[in-house]
Amino acid sequence: MKNVLLIDSGSGGINILKECIKIVSSCNYLMFCDNKHLPYGNRTKEELQKITLENLHNIYSFFKFDIVILACNTLTCTCLDLCRKEFPDKVFIGTVPAIKPALQKFKADEVLVMATEVTIKHNVLINKTPNLILKSMPTLAGDIDNNLDELSVLKNDLQEQLQEFQPKAVVLGCTHYIAVKGLLTEIFGNEVEFFDSANGVARRLKSFVPDEGTSYQLQFMVTDSQEFLPRFWYYYNSK
């Protein structure tokens, strides 16, 4: 059974974890929620690289991972190449905004990409694709973590921040944002199509894992305040 580490700040990676377990239910999973450094999206590339390498080395001392999923768009665009150099014998899977599938169906100026400032700055495809509609959401990841049990309280603020946009497609360019897809549907309407990275990451994981049945193991680890652990566990077990 492969040891699979998922790493993100806060709860965003849980959305990736859910899809991975649905598609690849034969791994020993560790979900590492790095609340100590939440949110990753507001940190510099240099900070993120230092934090991520320290976390990976510390985790490997007690969890001998075979595969690491950077379950965060920001970590992927700033740290993926460095992680592969640091651990050349391990498989690293990144999470990138699902812009390509959105552009297969819609024009660039019809696609709204919601992401962190760091993702917008460093993601290659975003910077190579003119006319995408870009919206930085610097506080949304933290707001989601703090209101996981009552996400509806975020609707008014989201509506205010997004009222100028009328997209035909929305790319959820941060793994946290999957949690508020229902609210965004209410804001933009049912005609708008949403794109996220969870299924693509899960299918990528499946390509590295042999079919060994449906038995899996799951552990959660939260840095800093442990008060988030039951909240994250409840969210994992919710729809």
Image: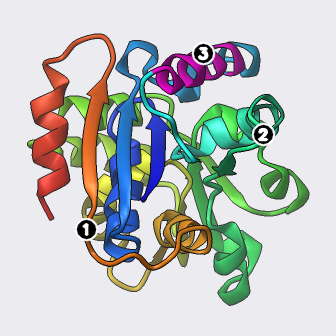
**How far across and how far down the image is residue 231, in percent?**
12, 35
Specify whether 218 is left or right of 172: left
Quarter of the image for residue 77 reads top right
Of labels 3 and 2, the one closer to you:
2
Q: SS class of the residue under badge 3?
A: helix
Could you tell which of marks 3 and 1 lies nearer the N-terminus? 3
Q: Quadrant of the C terminus?
A: bottom left
Left or right, residue 210 beside residue 207: left
Q: Residue at x 75, y 15 (%)?
A: 46
Q: Residue at x 60, y 15 (%)?
A: 51
What type is the residue that disc 1 sits on? Ser
Q: Residue at x 59, y 47 (%)?
A: 135
First along the sequence among labels 3 and 2? 3
What is the secondary structure assignment of the residue under circle 1? loop
When the figure is inspected, residue 39 is found, relative to residue 100, above or below; the finding is above
Identify the residue position indicated by label 3 in the image.
Answer: 51
Disc 2: which residue: 84
Foreground: 174 or 162? Answer: 174
Residue 215 — which label?
Answer: 1
The image shows a total of numbered marks equal to 3
Q: Earlier in the sequence, mark 1 or mark 2?
A: 2
Q: Residues within 10 Å of mark 1 (few under 14, many from 20)?
A: few
Residue 84 position, x and y percent, is: 78, 39
- Residue placed at 51% from the left, 16% from the top? 58
Where residue 116 sits: x, y (%)?
58, 37
Q: Is residue 239 magenta?
A: no
Magenta range is 49-61
